[in-house]
Structures are given as C-alpha cells and as structure tokens.
Amino acid sequence: MICDNRAGPYVVAVNTRDGTLVWKTSRSNPVEGYSTPAIYTPAEGRPQLLVFGSGALDAYDTDNGKRLRWVNRVGLQPKGVPCGEGEHGVCQRPRVR
C-alpha cells in the first residue's frame, strides 16, 4: 500500500490473511502521488514493487521493503501505472478514464 503525502510518505506490505504489518519503508521523494503501483518480476530475479512518486519511479523488494533502484525526473504527479518490459526496462501505461 502506498501512502504518499506531505507529512511522511511511506509504503507498506500487509498480510492479507490477518491484516498484520509485514514491513514499512519511508519514501523520501513523494509530495503527492496518484499512481497505482505494480508488481514486476524480472526474468532472473525476485518480484519488485514499482511505484511512481513525485519526481521518481522506485522499485522495492516485495519481501522486505528495501528500495532496490530508482529513476529520477519522471514528473511531479504521475498518474499512470508502471509496468515491467523486458529484463530491465520500465514503461508507463496511461490511466484510462
């Protein structure tokens, strides 16, 4: 779950069976965000949570919340859905209204 706001943004993983917190990671770059996160699994690697925020696209380890990689300069309030393409590439799907 992404909680982007001006007073302490973070991303959390919650156990879907009992609602307990699995991990919580602070996000330093977002001010506001309206993007839906996505799961991307590289051909050789573990699943990653892709999240657009204000000015960056972040990839988090789904097991522990560690920020694995990021790309800056993606806009201030992205509204698309990140998607994995190929081994390392990422694209943005536009939001459909």
Image (cartoon, rainbow, N blue to C red):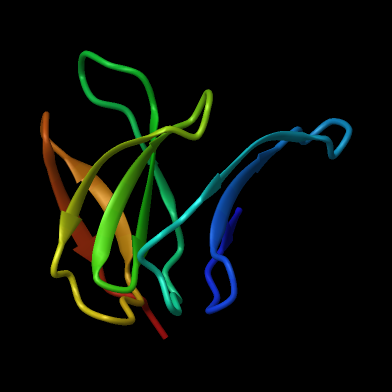
Q: Is residue 66 left or right of residue 43?
A: right
Residue that sits furthest to the top in the current view: 44
Which quadrant would residue 80 be assigned to in this image? bottom left
- Quarter of the rendering occupied by the C terminus: bottom left
Is residue 75 placed above or below 56 in the rendered structure?
A: below
The residue at 52%/23% (across/down) is 63
Residue that sits furthest to the bottom in the current view: 97
The residue at 35%/19% (across/down) is 46
Residue that sits furthest to the right in the current view: 18
Q: Nearer the viewer, residue 6 or 51?
A: 6
The residue at 31%/50% (across/down) is 58
Q: Is residue 93 left or right of residue 11?
A: left
Is residue 50 placed above or below 82 in the rendered structure?
A: above
Which quadrant would residue 2 be assigned to in this image? bottom right
Q: Is residue 93 left or right of residue 73?
A: right
| Residue 79, percent from left and from top | 36, 77
Is residue 4 placed above or below 16 in the rendered structure?
A: below
The residue at 11%/29% (across/down) is 87
| Residue 18, percent from left and from top | 89, 33
| Residue 65, percent from left and from top | 50, 34
